[in-house]
Image: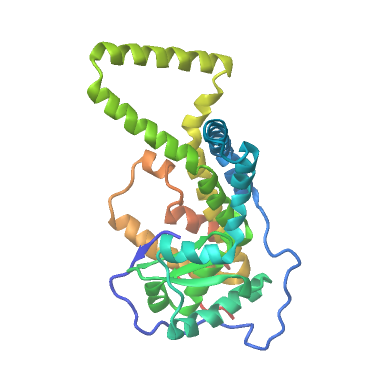
Amino acid sequence: MNPISDPAPDPHPAEDLAYRHAPGTRVTYRARQRGLDAAAWLRIALHLPGFLAGLALVGATALALEAWVGGPPAWAAVTLWVASGAFVFHQPTERLIARHVLRLHRPLPHEQAVLAPVWREVTARAGVDGERYQLWIEDSDDVNALAAAGHIVGVTRHALERLPRSQLAAVLAHELGHHTGGHAWAGLLGQWYGLPARAAWRALSRLRVQAARTLSPTTALVITSVAAFLGYRTLAATYGLPLLLLALPWLVAAVGRRAELRADAHAAKLGFAPMLVAVLHRTLAEEEAAKEDGLLERLLSSHPDARTRIHHLGPYLDPGTPQGGHPLG
């Protein structure tokens, strides 16, 4: 979800959620708790070049260490690197990520008292075991939420304080959609496996800047010419395929926008379309008040604008239902 600023919080959000699954109610879970939708598969495919580049760097480094200092076998290092992705689903590791990377904390008792029944309602409607997920709180002045790793669902403290329960449920249903669709762990795997390539690129960029400051103009021209020649030969030998890497940021952003729309659809199918539209109207007001982004910024954004999301939620709304949203009956 995009962050939403709300200058006038309601200290007592309305308890307007029509609960269908009170404690003790029988809940039927789906046989398949999560999967991979088209957006997740596309995200994995787009991260494949970064994975291969990272794998090559890890393998080359392991071979060099094995040859120079008698380190562990290169195949063992590569195998360990590939297997490290399993930590996405290792809950103790997820807790470290939540606390020290995402800066989240576990709900306090009064926060848990609000979250628990709403989360139970959302997961019961989805046929998902909510106990498999970890609920976290972010101390933020925005109304926002996130899905990360394999089991992390985070929501801001202000979302807890400002949103009516039905709208909070809609936000949580959206984040659950990221998990059940495979978006959260696919994105984290891509980020993890692409880390060596990104680190190498940053190091090369810094070396290039430092070299440009110290080399003479003639030496810099020679190096640039050699690099350009090698680049041309590489492109000719690979039929220009490396040029596709230039389009990756745009493609990744487009897939991210599609994943957001799919998570919206997941919440809508659970009956939260009017409530999610109500939340998005807050975002729409902020977007219209702020300076409009240019075309390039919109194309590189991982989230669709609020108007687009509201439009895609239209088919899930009853014809007579105002877009402000009403409690579920």
**Is 21 drawn above or below residue 309 in the view shown?**
below
Q: Quadrant of residue 138?
A: bottom left
Residue at 68%, 86% (x, y): give it.
25
Taking the image as shown, residue 223 lies to the left or right of residue 251, namely left
The residue lying furthest to the right in this view is 31
- Name the residue: 38% across, 78% down: 161
Taking the spot 52% from the left edge, 17% from the top edge, the residue there is 234
Residue 54 at x, y percent in the picture: 54, 38
Which residue shows up at 40% across the image and 12% down it?
226
Q: Position of residue 55 (x, y in %)?
A: 57, 37
Instruction: Examine the rendering and report whether any part of residue 321 can be seen.
Output: no
Describe residue 72's horizontal placement relative to residue 108 as left or right: right
Give 234 or 45, whichever is nearer the viewer: 234
- Residue 310 higher or lower than 134, as above or below: above
Residue 305, how many percent across, how many down?
43, 52
Q: Nearer the viewer, residue 64 or 89?
A: 64
Where is residue 319 shown, x and y percent of the image?
A: 57, 66
